[in-house]
Each structure stands twice: as structure tokens, then as C-alpha cells.
Amino acid sequence: MTMFKTYSKCRQTAPGIPQPADSRLWAVALCVCVLLLQCAGCVSPGQIDENLLTRYQKSALARSPQERAGDKGLDLLRPDAYEAKPFKIVKDELTDRDAVRLSLDEAVRLAVANSLDIRVVSFAPAISREQMIQAAAAFDWVVFAGASHTRTDHHTATAFPHYKARSVPVEVGVRKRTVTGGTAELAWDLTRTSDNSALTALNPNYESMLSLQLTQPLLRGAWPDYNLAALKIAQLGEKVSNSQFRQTVEQVVAEVQTTYWMLVQARRELEIQNALLAKTIETRDRVKARGALDATEVEIKQTEAAVESRRATLYRVRLSIFDIQDRLARLLAAARMNPLRRYAIITTTKAVTSKVSIDPTDQLVSALRHSPLMEQARLAIAAADVEVNVAKNETLPVLNLAASIGAQGMDRVGGRAGEESLTFDYLDHSVGLMFEYPIGNRAARARLRQRKFERLRSVTEMQNTADQVAVSVRDAIRQIETAFQEVQARRAAVAASRAQLKALEDTERIRGRLTPEFLNLKLQSQLTLAIAERAEIQTVVDFNSALARLAQITGTTLQQKNIKLAVEDGSR
């Protein structure tokens, strides 16, 4: 249903006579409308600071994410030799390779600066910010212009059977969409017309028309809550990208810490295995030296078998070091440590073995407040709220207001025609309403129920995430407490095993005769000590890894490592 009311008023004024007051009022009203549209046209995508482009994004824009020697063959794995702070190369006695000394803080710094995992996700915040700008740009002013040429040559059934005309319209103007859902258009048309009619007073003539057209929804599709929904969704998406970026950084930092402690463990196990092999070789040599006294061939072969068995275990432990080093080197993505270079990594940071006081309640509060998973769940609910509001608006009837005002001028000269239109002597204006409502309105109502269900799902997912985070926090705290208690027990076991082996060695010096039982007990005691030492370092690594995991769950990894992200500051 459409209702329009149109008014037209024409008044001719002789030159030199003052303009009527109502024409001046129309001119003032036109200027006020244009000014209001200009003020309503500024839609900002939100606070965007170009400095938020992280060093990863800047380096990727300036060059590739990590300079490689080429794009073919092994060059895909070979970074350029440039490095801001070259490592000092030393000799690793355990692996007999060139090595670099690396602390845990240096490893974290290198990973944050170079990790390709971080670089991949670092583009997401920048992409989201561009999407925000695109959403805000829907309300920008649009300049339009057009020109055409029309020639008419008709045979008519009038007193003038042959009608010829030529028309050349030119149009320029601006148009914009407002945050209230309306559209405003300010246009100026100048049309030159000429024909062969004897009744045309001005031939050729120029007609100038200055017009302002407004359309505004009053119910469905109206007001900022509906029309700014896409921008709000984009802003929430940018916050989600920042949260995911921070989550990835924390995951990489936590993985670096865990891998670093695994390397500490592997190197310590290699030391333990080397010491075990050395003691076994020493035992074998002593047994061989007593071959002329009381050592039998069986006992000699027993020690030789023990030596070779422990040598084989040494090779296996050494292999694990290389595997862990490759994993750590990939996370660090440093030019000196890549799959094509055989550098060993010497860890310099000592593992934490002292007791850590942990308040479970405080850790739960920190996790619920800082965890990226909780932040993303809350943002999902906020986005669902926007969608619900949009769906509510779409259940309303369509009631649109349309209004226009135009000022016309005509003359033989185009410039004078334009000046006449600015006098507002010849004004047209119209006002109308258009109503529309689907019977039953089933689609809109179903969409509203869908959005409400989606919001309930988001709330449920947040509660589920909160429960999972709480369980993970409690589990990590129990692992920390258990690992610390186990460290104490393992240390006592190592001390007892070492004391037992020393007692056997002291007994061997004063013992008169070597028996197979004593030799077997000594070899077993050496192995027991090595097993106890390896179990001790395992529990120490478990303790430190559990601390890193707790920090990751609570979302405090970056704070603990004093890492600040530019995107984090911007979102705040």
C-alpha cells in the first residue's frame, strides 16, 4: 500500500522584485537537510591505529615472512644467512657438533620474533581491521554523474506531422546511506532541449533542476541498532582475531617451554647414560684384569654384554636429542638453526625445583578473566546479541517514508538556468508512505527464533568452556603438586642408589674373591642408579612443564614472560 501527497508551486517574478519569504524558507530548509546529512555521514570503523600492525605483519609486508634462499628444491628450507644477533658457536662435547648456547628466555624471544605459526595467524587482526573499514564504508558519500544524448524523429498524427527533437541531459550529485537506514541524494540536472515545434517559446532551452530526495524506513530496517549491525559484527570479529592471535602466541610460547625442558631432559639423560657406560667399561676392565686370578670367561662376557647394551641405549638417547632439537629449531625459526644445518643446542637455563605456592581460587579467577577461550566465548555471545536484535527488527512491518524537494530553472543559457534554480522560485516537493507486511510473517519469526537458539547455544558453550577451563586448572595444579612431591621422592631414591653403589664399590676393594652374584649385583646397581637419575630429571621436567601449562590455561603466559603485543594494547 502506497500513499503519496505531492505539492507543486510555480511563481514567476519580474527582475528586481524581492523574493517571497516562503522561497527563502525552502532554501534554508534545504541547506539544513544537507548539513544534517553531512553530520550523519561520518561512520567510524572504530579505533584503528596503524601502529597495531605487529612486527610480523610489517616484515611480511616489506618482504616475505622469512627470507629464504629461493623457491625451488632445498632452497625452500634454507633461510638467508642474515640474523640480527648472531649466535656464538661453541663445541658440544655430548654430540661432538658445533653448538649454540641458548637460554629459555632467548628461545621464547626467538619464537615470538620468528615463529611461522605466529606469523600465519598474525595477519588475521589486520584482515579483520580491513573488514571493519569495509563495513563502515557502506555509509560513505558516493559521487555520481552521468550524461546522455537522445535524438527523436517521429511521424505524428498532429498538425505538425514530422517531429524532431534533441535532448542532452547532464546529471551530477552525491548520495549516501545513513545510519538510520535511510538514503539521501542531492542531485543537479541540466538538460539542453531543442525541437522543430513552433509552439516552443525557448528553442533551444536549458532546464536546471536541483533536487534532494530522502527515503527513511520507520520500522523494519530502521535506526542505528539495525544498520550498524554489520559494523558491530566486524568489530567483534576483530577482537576475536586479536584473541586468537594472543592464544596462538601463548600456545607457541608454552610449546617452546615444554620442548626446551624436553631438551634439558634429553641432554641430562645423555650425560647419565655416558656416565653409566663409563662405569660399566671400568667394571669390564677390572674384571678382565682379574682374569688371571678368579674372573671366569662367563663373568668377562657378562660385563662385555652390559657394555654393548648400554652403548646401544646411548645411541638411542642421542637420537632423541636430535629429534627434540629439530622440533625446537622449527619453533624458533632462526637462520642458524634450520633443517639444513647441523647445530646442536646447549640449554643454559636451570629447571625450577623449588616449591611453588599456588592459590587454586586465584588461578581459577585468572583463567576465567584472561583465558583467550573465555574471551572468545564472551565475544560470541555479544555477536549473537547483535544478530538477535537484527532479527527482531526484521519481524516488524515495512513502513518507509519518502520525501523530495526540487528547485527548477529554465533559460536559453545554461548558466542562467542554473542561477534561476537557485532562486527557488519554482519548487516541487512530495511526501509519501509505503506500507508492507507479509501475512503470517513466518520467515522473519522463524529467523528470530533461530537467532535466539544460537544465542542460547553461545551461552551454553561459554558455560561449557568455563567448566573445561576450571577442570584444566585444577588438573594442572594437581600435576604441579604431585610432580614436586615426586621430585623429592626421586631425589631420595637417587641418593639411596648412589649410596648403595658406593657401598658395593667399597666392598669390592676389600673383597677377596669376585663371585658372579656380586658382579651381577654391581652391574644392576649401576643401572638402578642411572634409572633413578633419569626418573628424577623426568619429574623435574614434568614439574616445569606443568607450570608452563598452568600459565597457558590461565592466559598469563605472556605476562609471565613480559611479552606485550601491539594488538592487545589496541583492543583494550
Image (tube, rainbow, N blue to C red):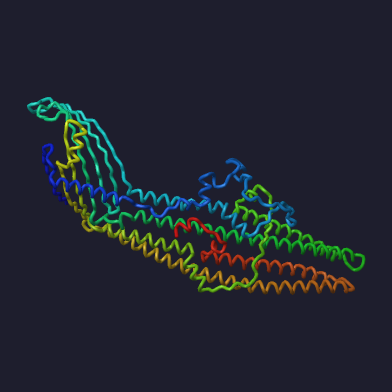
Q: Could you tell me which residue is drawn at 43 percent across and 52 percent down?
A: 129
Say which of 4 and 534 sits in front: 4
Residue most toward the right? Answer: 292
Q: Could you tell me which residue is drawn at 86 percent across and 63 percent down?
A: 285
Q: Position of residue 202 (x, y in %)?
A: 14, 30
* Up/down of 83 relative to 266, above or below: above
Left or right, 12 with reference to 258: left
Q: Could you tell me which residue is drawn at 44 percent across and 67 percent down?
A: 464
Q: Position of residue 388 (x, y in %)?
A: 33, 60
Quadrant into which the C terminus falls = bottom left
Q: Position of residue 347 (x, y in %)?
A: 67, 59
The quadrant holding residue 453 is bottom left
Left or right, 183 with reference to 497: left
Q: How many marks?
A: 0
Q: Position of residue 103 (x, y in %)?
A: 65, 59
The quadrant holding residue 230 is bottom left
Say which of 28 and 135 sits in front: 28
